[in-house]
Image (tube, coloured by chain):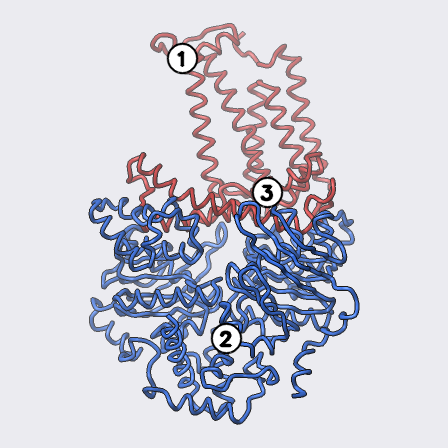
Amino acid sequence: MTSPLLGYLDRPGPLHTLSGVSKLVLVLAVVLGAAIGFDVRYLAVVGAGSLVLWAISRVPPRDLAVVLWLIALFMVLNNLGIFLFAPGYGTELFGTRHVLLDGPWRWDVTAEQLFYQLAVTLKYFAVLPSVLLFVATTRPPELASTLNRIGVPYRIAYAVSLALRYIPDVQREFRTISAAQQARGLDTSRAAPLRVRLRNLTSILMPLLLGTFDRIDAVSAAMELRGFGRGRKRTWLVRSPLRGRDAVVIAAAVVVVVVPLVLLGVNGGRFWNPFV
Amino acid sequence: MTAASTGGSAGGGGGTGRGSAPLIELSGYGFQYRAQSAPTLHDIDLSVHRGEKIAIVGASGSGKSTLVNVLNGLIPHHHRGTSTGTVRVLGRDPAAVPLVETAAVVGTVLQDTGSQFVALTVGEDIAFSLENQQVDPSEMPARIARAAQLAGIEDRLMDSPQDLSGGQKQRVAIAGVLVDDVEVLLLDEPLANLDPATGRAAVELLDTLHRDHGATIVLVEHRLEDVLHRDVDRIVLMADGRIVLDAPPDQVLASGALEEHGIRPPLHVTALAYAGAPVTASQRPSRSADVALTAQQITAVQDWVAAAPVAGEAPADGEALAPGAVRSDASGTAARTALDLDAVSCDLPVGPDRRRTVLEGISAAVRPGEMLGVLGSNGAGKSTLARVIAGFEEITGGRLRIGGVDAAGWSLAEHGERVGFVLQDPGQMLSRPQVSDEIALGLRARGVDEVEIARRTATVLEICGLSPFRSWPLAALSHGQRKRVTIAAVLALEPEVLILDEPTAGQDFAHYTEFMDFLRGLHATGTTVVLITHDMHLAVEYTDRVLVLSEGRLLADDDPARVLTDPALTARADLVVTGLYDLARRCGISDPHTLVRRFVAADRERRGARR
């Protein structure tokens, strides 16, 4: 497969036509809102919103399968970790204790704990799809100009967008090197024991790394020659203007940040407590 | 001898700027990289005047790439070291001004433009320099359009880099430099990644920029015959970090200094020398089609061809077998073929949901012990064919038999036991710090015992001429030596077939010859060799038979000399006929083929004698 691991996917969809700026504002609002608010109702709404956006974006989840699996894995590990190390945290937070399942030692499953972990899980659903969607629907040059427009120095903004831009090339390179090494008998499939697999993987990563360094050197020389870094600012050819629907998106972003702030006051804390 | 003076001022714009101060001037210049123990450049005197077109040629390691970096200011701003003497670009020392000021005068198109695309579309990439200068975005489209038109890429502004061919990517890079109104266009090995037909188109483009738009052009190359497809004012020949000759092309070609310093002269010039009637500068020998041949030279060539030791001697060892015989053979007993392709097709994904047919219905057979060429322009499907045979890509139609066995369902490792595939870039295969470790890597992975590993390693090191380097770090080897290590590593697995992708790409003539002679020696020991190449002369010189691919289809399966003499076929496959055919035609030799064979035989004799 040559489809990218993570990066811009060129599929026309409604989110692709929005300005990078409004999309970035929304993503930042979601991240900020989810960081402030721990109210399950709020997180559920934002999470559902993220999934709806994904649905209308026409970005098939298959295209980002690897990243999605990694996130799912972290989500599960995170949940297991919380339960392992702090099984009573929910009770501490909500002040009640409804045991659902009597576990060994302190690992009792309580409704409060499940509710707390539900909130943590919902944060994943609220934040990550929108970040991935932003990356997948914003063309790297526009991403760079967007980051630059909100105050990120252009050198850093360009570095980020170039890194995303070269992911497909590095993947292609990885495939070729990997095939060449496998043809020599270096097995990196599941059939080989883990230790052998890791050792064989280094035989692929070494040439890949060295090749990448050479390439970075060549690209940076080429960019320097074309005047990159000469001034403190630069202009951008592609800078889509803000339109009506961008205003709608930015308004939505404001709501996404204001709601958890209001909820802080209403709930008298970060959590909404259904147990009292 | 009036022709000599005409030759001296060839190329229109050459004389115009001579009176004014040079755009670039180096005097007594030397440079040593910080990480190296000896200087790379010595005592360089070079001046470039407005409106000139100069070709800098030299073997690998002659210092020509370093010279490029001096001219464009990357030395000393990007690569550090110590220098002696003086450099002036438009009267100023590049070391004393910011890199961008030098870059605004000398626009550089670096090697391998494909991997240096910084934007997602052609238009944005061309705009890159304007953006950095903080040009107002509203002014950009007009300037982009003008630069794109000059470079002949104006109809692809919205395309992304992966939709462009190598030649088109280079045009984008040229437009990205022209957008700045630079004084000098500097190109570092512009032909290195292009097939001959595309390379010629690039040379023509540069010539148009030079003649119609007054551009000053400095290009660094070792493919001299392709460069001379259009006039240049001067050739600067470099060797061992020095300029050994700086003269009009006619004088350089007649001097005989090129071959001595590892550069292949145009084939017709060499052929005339072999025939005992070398060219003189006054004959304007740059191009085979319009060199002023004398009657005496024509007779000399005719006599030389007629005096061939054995009339109609085939170019290589496998002369007894006609190409057609192989296929009929294959249909009878599949066991006798090393490779047997039966209507092989391959589709590759080019986007999330799109696939493109890269190979379609390829049928061919390769005999054990054959040396076969696969010819075609870039994008014809040659590399994909090699990758399919090596198991890197899956076949989507037809059948592939290796050693008579159907390869369907084989793992990559199983393919690797029978087919050794040597990638174009050795960097993609080498992963160990040391030569002998690298060779043993595949054997250890296959669980071969240490005694056998030692035996095979010693054998392949010997075959590949690497025994003295067995415990060397790979980083200390030259490109050609590293390439041999990859071949040794593949040979150690004792494959039945060896496939090499563009084995000589980017190598100068001396290394090319050395490497190809090594491959011929390997072939003589019984290894079946398949060469993927776009170099027609390489195919004629070293193979018994060629497959010609174009747009994923097999156009021909024949003797290389016969393929080359078929103008309709070469045109369809986008191949470039060498200067030897023009020479044969102009000397009234009815079968150009005989001259080519005579040339190859003489070439081989000459090289044998030198060793």
Q: The red chain is which one?
A: A
SS class, disc 3: helix
SS class, disc 2: loop
Q: Please name the amino acid that badge 3 sits on.
A: Thr
**Residue located beneath label 1 in the image:** A109
In the shown orientation, is residue B496 left or right of residue B573? left
Q: The disc numbered 3 marks a residue on which chain?
A: A
Could you say where residue A24 lies in the image, as x and y percent from the top left?
A: 65, 35
Q: The disc numbered 1 marks a residue on which chain?
A: A
Q: How far apart are marks 3 and 2 (CA)?
A: 44 Å
In the image, residue B560 sits, relative to residue A267, either above or below, namely below
Alpha-carbon neighbours of circle 2 within 10 Å: few (<14), some, or many (≥20)? many
Residue occupying image coordinates x 28% and y 36%: A193
Where, quadrant-wise, is the N terminus of chain B in this rendering? bottom right
In the shown orientation, is residue A274 left or right of residue A205? right
In the shown orientation, is residue B541 left or right of residue B443? right
In the image, residue A130 sits, relative to residue A238, either above or below, namely above
Q: The disc numbered 2 marks a residue on which chain?
A: B
Could you say where residue A241 lies in the image, as x and y percent from the top left?
A: 73, 44
SS class, disc 1: strand
**Residue located beneath label 3 in the image:** A137
Q: How far apart are marks 1 and 3 (CA)?
A: 41 Å
Q: In which quarter of the image is residue A190?
A: top left
Alpha-carbon neighbours of circle 3 within 10 Å: few (<14), some, or many (≥20)? many
Q: Relative to the observer, which residue lies in front, B514 or B356?
A: B514
Q: Which chain is blue?
A: B
**Residue located beneath label 2 in the image:** B576
Q: How many marks?
A: 3
Residue occupying image coordinates x 26% and y 53%: B458
Could you say where residue B361 lies in the image, as x and y percent from the top left?
A: 37, 67
